Image (cartoon, rainbow, N blue to C red):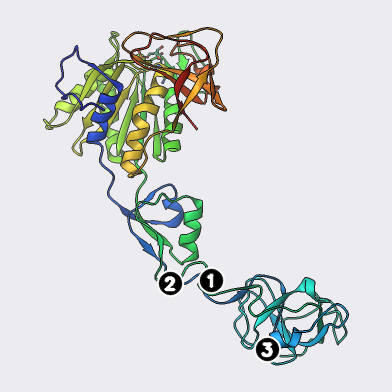
Amino acid sequence: MSSPAPRTAGQDHLWSVDEHLADILATVRPLEPIELQLLDAQGCVLVEDVTVRVSLPPFDNSSMDGYAVRVADIAGASEEYPAALTVIGDVAAGQDGLLHVGPGQAARIMTGAPLPPGAETVVPVEWTDGGLGGGPVTGMRARSADPEGAHGQVRVHRPAPARAHVRAQGSDVQAGDLALAEGTLLGPPQIALLAAIGRGTVRVRPRPRVVVMSTGSELVQPDQKLAHGQIYDSNSFALTAAARDAGAIAYRVGAVADDAETLRSAIEDQLVRADLVVTTGGVSVGAYDVVKEALAHVADEDEPGAGVDFRKLAMQPGKPQGFGTVGPDHTPLLALPGNPVSSYVSFELFVRPAIRALMGVPDIHRPTTRAVLTADKALTSPAGRRQFLRGSYTDGRVTPVGGAGSHLIAALAHADALIVVPEDKESVEPGTEVEVVLLG
Ligand code: AMP
Ligand code: MG
């Protein structure tokens, strides 16, 4: 990857995709760690080594519903000659050692219940008559949890070695062990472990707060009536969803009209809750492309270091892009083009990695793979620009979905991959290998 060109690069400089991304990643720093409740930390990166405070399991316990007994009492047991033991009571999960199992005795034990003192092993209920073999009560359900009283007899018809069906204390993890190392991404299984060892909160990098703002006086909210010339604002929905998908807390701001002053104050209003601002539209060279004007204004105010640079990228779609920082906290801002496919592809290439970098995730990129192009004709791509076509990927093959038009939202909705045609390729024949970004 080449080093980024300076922010002051001339208007004519055509930025490569890699240069633009490198510039963004050089600016975006991981957020400061905070202590979060376990469920709020889902998807976040741990910034502490978590050691085990309580061994797992915390005590020896039964892995089966059955009977806790002494090994010698069932040593010769068989179907023909079962061992008859006196049932002295129940041990349920959560119950504390009230029973002591002596010679000739058995305690009915439930899965997860602590092995009572005196007992050496557990025989599953399937190896017994379930306590039906006579005595004052019949059937497991009929028994009350009376730990003191005798409960009749159980016949055991198989022997068991010591500690059979016993989950030993610390057999999962031991107190003092490293449970999870700093840098671990917390998914459901990691959250399970943290809860199991008694951690209610953890220190992580928080989810970035991403404000998504669309611009355009033609934009109408879904569910409202469209007048001629108006369209529904889809970008702010797409990008808010994409930001959430990337791990952010995303705020969608309703479409802002093409008026520099309105946009400028809307952005300023949002900065209080933004770790990253994403705008769409208004970055090309049309007469009403007000984002440049508005952001230049924000940038100039009291903050000589900050500023948003508008540039042309050697890519398709997504040629016009803006990047910089705004406001007193130098909040990073990415100004994406307005065409729906352009804005989505730009998000995938630049905003998603930025969000992942803010989260401190080790691997910020979507997985890529190589696939054989399946198509009826060659793909064409403009010289000198990296093209990203929508595709559908299965089993090492990729098929283009829809054309290159950056307004084709329906095709985008049926794609799950981006086909990458490098800058130096103007056509790709069916049957050849291409690079593919998997969108998950
Ligand atoms: P712009 O870059 O603002 O000139 O927009 C380029 C094209 O994308 C125009 O056809 C816009 O109407 C369309 N567009 C811009 N913003 C949105 C949006 N939020 N949702 C859907 N289409 C949009
Ligand atoms: Mg516009």
Q: Secondary structure at mark 1?
A: loop
| Residue positioned 13% across, 32% down in the render | 303
| Left-right relation of 294 to 46 | left
Disc nearer the start of the sequence (2/3):
3
Q: Where on the picture, by quarter, is residue 282?
A: top left
Residue 119: image location, x then y, percent: 65, 85
Mark pair 3, 1: CA separation: 22 Å
Pointer 3 or 1: first along the chain: 1
**Residue 261 placement: quadrant:** top left
Q: Is residue 17 above or below residue 27?
A: above
Front residue of this view, candidates 278 and 89: 89
Amino acid, disc 1: Pro
Residue type marked 3 = Val
Residue 208 point in image, percent of width and height: 34, 42
Total marks placed: 3
Q: Which residue is mark 2?
A: 175
Marker disc for residue 57: 1
In this view, the residue in front, 250 or 96, is 96
Rate crowding at label 1 as few (under 14), some (14 to 19) or many (20 or more) other CA atoms within 10 Å: some
| Type of the residue with mark 2 | Ala
The image quadrant of residue 158 is bottom right
Residue 50 x/y as whole percent: 38, 62
Numbered label attached to residue 4: none
Residue 47 seen in render: yes
Quadrant where the N terminus sits is: top left
Mark 3 packing: few (<14 Cα in 10 Å), some, or many (20+)?
Answer: many
Q: Name the quadrant where ligand 1 sits.
A: top left
Identify residue for label 3: 101
Q: Are marks 3 and 1 in contact (CB under 8 Å)?
A: no
Is tag 2's residue or tag 1's residue first in the polypeptide sequence? 1
Marks 2,1: beta carbons within 8 A = no
